Image: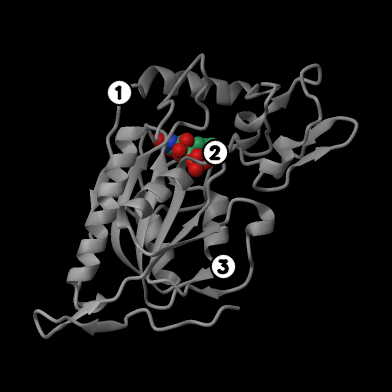
Amino acid sequence: MVHPQNNSKSTPCPDHGETEMNIEAAHLICYSPTRTTFNTLKAIADGMKLPATRSLDLTLPEQASNEEIAILSDVAIIGVPVYAGRIAPVAATRLKSIKGHNTPAVIVVVYGNRHYDNALAELKQLAEESDFVVVAAAALIGEHSYSSPDKPVAAGRPDDEDKRAASAFGSKVLAKLKAATDLSSLPVLGLPGSLPEGPYIGPANVAPETDPELCTLCGQCAESCPTGAITISETQTTDASLCTFCCACLKTCPEGAIQIGFPKILEKVDLLYTNCQTRREPEIFL
Ligand SMILES: Cc1cc2nc3c(=O)[nH]c(=O)nc-3n(C[C@H](O)[C@H](O)[C@H](O)COP(=O)(O)O)c2cc1C
């Protein structure tokens, strides 16, 4: 348990005799199996140019603390990937273990060039339930987890242009916070989408397929798996009941031994490849 500090502290502003918010550090909180969300958050933090940036990465099982942590930093940047138009379900569960303390937060959803649907609205609610004050939001684009050299979807994103946009967003968020006298003076942020109803419906009880001829049992897939679904012994096996089809294993494998395989997901890949080629651009809400 980390003890909280008062994040709404303010210091006298010499020019105006008022107070300005004292922002010293950014705290990156993310879940990011194929790392596009992490890289996007880093670009936002770069744009803030704060003296300190701390990282709280919830991607791997051993990093997912069940403790309640009151964030000590001055601004949290919370980022998750979009799965089926919502927050990736493992991210939603793990984020609940992180508590703010009236901490200003930027919320970010990263999606694979189809759409983010209700994910921003869902993330806002989750952040507010954990005592974060959402001061800005963004929906940004990352290479689709199902993208491959044969059927690329948003391949290589976030690219330089995306990172420049993310950094510019970070710089604007900081300016907004510094201009505010306190968090309660900021208007409520309106965001698109509505709160999703019912449980998340995504791939269940299926897992990518591994070609035993190509697999060298190096174990990199197991190390990258956010749910610890992969075991390496005489063969590599994946527990489909734990697999979320995040594709971290597939993108990490140095031998290209892991493929999507499952017909229903291959159909989705075709649809994405056919329908989601028009470049979508970052959306920011300040
Ligand atoms: C199961 C699953 C569902 C997804 N659903 C969507 C979606 O609804 N819309 C979209 O644009 N991208 C979707 N994506 C793509 C991811 O949002 C995108 O690739 C994101 O950049 C992955 O983030 P990461 O690199 O941090 O893991 C989905 C990916 C997976 C694995």
Q: Between marks 2 and 3, how big is the CA–CA gap?
A: 22 Å
Sequence-wise, which precedes: disc 2 or disc 3?
2
Sequence-wise, which precedes: disc 3 or disc 1?
3
Where does the C terminus fall, quadrant-wise?
bottom left
Seen in the picture, residue 97 relative to 113 is either above or below; the reply is below
Q: Between marks 3 and 1, how big is the CA–CA gap?
A: 37 Å
Mark 2, secondary structure of its residue: loop
Q: Which residue is mark 2?
A: 34
Q: Specify whether 143 is left or right of 136.
A: right
Q: Specify whether 232 is left or right of 65.
A: right
Identify which residue, 44 or 90, lies in the foreground.
44
Seen in the picture, residue 33 relative to 234 is either above or below; the reply is below
Residue 39 spot, x, y in % from top left: 45, 44
The disc label shown at residue 278, or none:
1
Q: Which residue is mark 3?
A: 97
Q: Is mark 2 within 8 Å of ligand 1?
A: yes
Residue 27 visible? The answer is yes
Where does the N terminus fall, quadrant-wise?
bottom right
Identify which residue, 36 or 23, lies in the foreground.
23
Residue depicted at x 39% and y 36%: 158
Residue depicted at x 53% and y 43%: 201
Q: Residues within 10 Å of mark 1 (few under 14, many from 20)?
A: few
Q: What type is the residue that disc 1 sits on?
A: Thr
Residue 160 spot, x, y in % from top left: 34, 34
